[in-house]
Image (tube, rainbow, N blue to C red):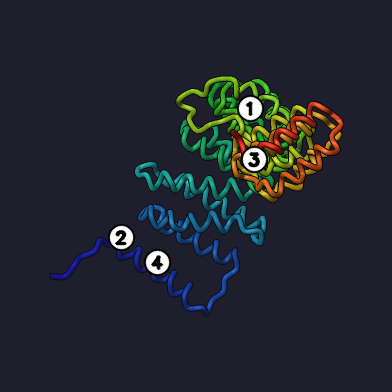
Amino acid sequence: MKKLFPVTTILLLVALSGQCVRAGSGTEILSTQEKLEKRLASAERWQRWSPMATNNALQDIVDLMKKPDLDAGARLEATRRLIKIYYAVDDSSLTNNANKKRILEAIGASDSSSEAQDFFIKVLDSDKDEYRKMAMWSIDGPYGVHGDVIYDKIKSLEKNGVIARGLSMATLAKANPERAIEEIKEFLKTTQDLKEFVGVGLSLPDRYQGDPNVLDVIVDRYEDFKSKPIPAEYKGYTPEGALVYPWLWKYIDAREGKRLRIALEMIKNKGVCGSDDIPRLTKKIKSTNAITREATADFLDSQIGSGNLPKEKVLPILEETRNSEHDQKLKKKLGEIIGRHKKGGRP
């Protein structure tokens, strides 16, 4: 008995086989714009008949629209066609729902045109919270949807209680990082919510991630959050989680004194220290700042003890520091650290 296949399955197989022939023949090398045109045509063809085929096309479209060799005119044309698909697709299935989100991702990350902005404003104003959140996540300047129009809309939604202030920070940072930075710093100074603190810290715009003057506010709040019990629902969140370790190391390179001590404690709790970090720590233990020298000595002590740093490399540094140290209290402490590790480590 012959097996019967649904018509939609047959059509999908035919379409996919056609794509395989084109991709595998090796006879046709397409530009990004030509590839985008083919996938847009596929999404338009299948939007009403096969949500899965549409989704496959949209996945490719997201990647293609992010390609740097695609010109602004092609991005705008793609945006116009994707907007039509967005409004033509209903919410009758999870796949259709995902397709709408794919469209928001494609436009948000790649098109800075006023038409893309207007479309996002409408989505942000809609009563569909899941699409609003996806639009906020997808906003991505300077190449995608961004600018003062988007910034002002997010602020308006926040003011009217449509979105939480903590949730708005990351979107504001992408919409206009220069306008957002002071507001983000103020939020980080005042929030009592650990999850929001970590999330907003990690959302700092790229250009500010290594700026110690910006990161000060996170380091300054560390002890405050550390002194409080972490709610059960925030399991997995820690105050040091607001900074990834490359930012922290850059911060350590730039800071001295108490803030340096706190930053080293954050690194210690993250457990991200290795032999490659010895040169920067050597520089710190030779600082003219006594707090910096002691904090670095304590940190090196802990890292030998935990096995992150080999004592055969660190002990000579500590011995040299002890020999030149003029602070008698610190000199004695260095001697105790050296003696302990020469005997085999912590008691």
Rendered location of residue 269, percent (x, y): 60, 35
Distance (Cα) linking label 2 and label 1? 45 Å
Q: Nearer the viewer, mark 2 or mark 1?
A: 1
Distance (Cα) linking label 1 and label 3? 61 Å
Rendered location of residue 217, percent (x, y): 71, 27
Q: Which mark is residue 343?
A: 3
Residue name at image x 62 percent, y 50 percent: 110
- Residue occupied by mark 1: 155
Residue name at image x 65 percent, y 23 percent: 223
In the depicted structure, whether residue 339 falls above or below residue 225: below
Distance (Cα) linking label 4 and label 1? 45 Å
- Residue occupied by mark 4: 16
Work out whether mark 4 precedes mark 2 in sequence or the reverse, and give the earlier one. 2
Q: Which mark is residue 8?
A: 2
Q: Are marks 4 and 2 in contact (CB under 8 Å)?
A: no
Q: Label 3, secondary structure: give it.
A: loop
Distance (Cα) linking label 4 and label 2? 12 Å
Give the quarter of the image for residue 196: top right
